[in-house]
Image (cartoon, helix red, strand yellow):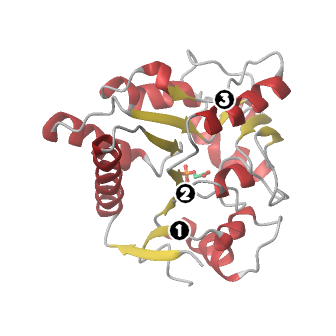
Amino acid sequence: MPQIALHSSAQEAAQVVARHISDLIRTRSAMGKHLVLGLATGSTPLPLYAELVRLHREEGLSFKKVITFNLDEYEGLDGSQPQSYRYYMNEHLFNRIDIPLPQTHIPDGKSANLEQTCAAYEAAIQQAGGLDLQILGIGSTGHIGFNEPPSARDSRTRRVHLDAKTRQDNAIFFKQPGDVPHGAITMGVATILEAREIALLALGPNKAAIIKRALTEKPHALCPATWLQEHPACTFHLDAASSSLV
Ligand code: PGA
């Protein structure tokens, strides 16, 4: 079962997870190795990225030996479009730290050959040595990445159809609700569960109901976050509001 880390605020959760990432970077660097970090987008990780930027600027934390793989990208958007996750990551993290951009990976939402793009993404993760730590949020549908219900335990990086509820939740990032893409490319459940460690962030009252489901329902495809119960090193970073029903 996931461990639960209770925090007094989103800021505190961000500080704890950022400190952990910083420790991992330094430990791996001391061994002459890169850290392979899985990253997430959405509102929840923004304080984490702000804290990583602060650690870089004020404490000299270097990301030159970090390789990143993002969970997902909208279909049909390219990195020049502000709603794309490539744009989000460049804006909030990559352009503010010293990571070489070629070491950052996000699925290509504009790919003409999605099947090949997805297979190549899986291969690139393997070639980097696998994910050392995957950062996750959780959607109100129980999605992790964009693994909407139903998502099988053995699913891999693939094209998915976004749930109507997810499109509604994410409409705040678009000019009009109808602009939210219908499809996305996402790492699969199996891809995520192969990370050596997972840190899920869920803060505030809107996450309480889905956190309860994720922790109390037996693992099943209709609530993909329940698969995390099967991971040996997964921590849910919660606050009083998001953990209130557990
Ligand atoms: P949020 O999204 O951080 O914007 O709530 C989480 C998710 O959909 O995984």
Q: Residue 233 carries which label?
A: 1
Q: Which residue is drawn at 50% across and 82% down?
A: 244
Q: Which of 91 and 37 is in front in this view?
A: 37
Q: Dot 1, crowdedness within 10 Å: few (<14), some or many (≥20)?
A: some
- Cα separation, mark 3 vs mark 1, equals 25 Å
Closer mark to the observer between disc 3 and disc 2: 2
Residue 47, x across and y down, in percent: 35, 49
Q: Residue at x 58, y 71 (%)?
A: 232
| Residue at the left extreme, as displayed | 58
Are the two marked residues, 3 and 1, in contact with CB atoms closer than 8 angstroms? no
Indicate the quadrant where residue 31 lies.
top left
Residue type at tag 2: Arg
Q: Dot 3, crowdedness within 10 Å: few (<14), some or many (≥20)?
A: many
Q: In the rendered image, which quarter contains the N terminus?
A: bottom right
Residue type at tag 3: Pro
Q: Which of 239 and 117 is in front in this view?
A: 117
Residue 239's place in the image compared with 106, above or below, is: below
Q: SS for tag 1?
A: loop
Residue type at tag 1: Ala
Residue labelled with disc 2: 196
Residue 78, x across and y down, in percent: 64, 18
- Cα separation, mark 1 vs mark 2, equals 7 Å
Q: Which of 197 and 150 is in front in this view?
A: 197
Residue 116's place in the image compared with 12, above or below, is: above
Residue labelled with disc 3: 107
Are the two marked residues, 1 and 2, in contact with CB atoms closer than 8 angstroms? yes
**Upstream in sequence: badge 3 or badge 2:** 3
Q: Which residue is drawn at 63% across and 78% down?
A: 215
**Upstream in sequence: badge 3 or badge 1:** 3
Looking at the image, residue 168 sits to the left or right of residue 156; the answer is left
Looking at the image, residue 55 sits to the left or right of residue 189; the answer is left
